[in-house]
Amino acid sequence: MTSRVLFVSPASSPSLRQARFDDGDAIDDVGAARARAAAGSLPPAARVLTSPGVRCRQTAEALGLDGARTPELGAWDVGRWRGLTLDEVGATEPEAVARWLADPDSAPHGGESVHELCVRVGHWLDGARDFDGRTVAVVEPEVVRAAVVHALGLGAAAFWRLDVPPLTVTELSGRSGRWNLRLGRHLAASDTPSPR
């Protein structure tokens, strides 16, 4: 039995463009147009899931996907930093930011640490390995990063070394207790669905 999970990152939004911690904003017009143009470019899936966040739900809708909201794949809880840019937080709490970036167990914002995020997403991914078929999940970039860290058995510090651009697909295929990674690709109207 092989399980395939295609993680789709959301279309662009003001928060993504400004490097702002997710504040629940909607995707922007450019992102919505790109997502609509990419509708139909994903292979058929046995199930479709979305992060409960607005931009993930809107991206799924623009892609023509009807996904079930999945709290386990929700956005990273960054506590009181939500809605702020990293520069804004760095200007007022430079020591906290330095600690947060250096220590995967640190959560000076009062939300989840990198380690806790990776554990949460990893727990969901472990359960997904038992699902025979393809899952498409529209989730925040940090959820994709956490899934890759878990799937490859990387240390949580590797989380900061992974970039997930808007409207890209990162595929994990699992069998026999391990995951293989197919690196992200951009969704575009010219994409042809993979037959796998």
Image (tube, rainbow, N blue to C red):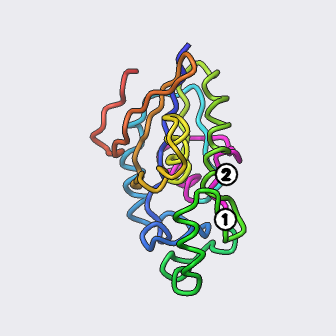
Range of the magenta residues?
Answer: 55-78
Neighbor class of circle 1 (other Cα within 10 Å; few <14, some 14-19, many 20+) is: many
The residue closer to the viewer here, 135 or 109, is 109
Residues 74 and 67: in front is 74
Quarter of the image for residue 84 reads bottom right
Q: Position of residue 90 (x, y in %)?
A: 52, 80
Residue at figure coordinates x 44%, y 34% from the top left? 171
What residue sits right under mark 1 in the picture?
107
**Where's residue 57, x and y in %?**
59, 52
Residue 61 on the magenta segment:
yes
Indicate the quadrant containing the C terminus: top left, top right, bottom left or bottom right: top left
How busy is the neighbourhood of tag 2: few (under 14 within 10 Å), some, or many (20 plus)? some
Query: Which residue is labeled 2 in the image?
Result: 116
Q: Is residue 196 above or below residue 71?
A: above
Residue occupying image coordinates x 41% and y 60%: 31
Residue under the image location 34 percent in, 46 percent down: 186
Q: Are marks 2 and 1 in contact (CB under 8 Å)?
A: yes
Is 16 located above or below residue 162 in the figure? below
The image shows residue 61, relative to residue 23, as above or below, that is: above
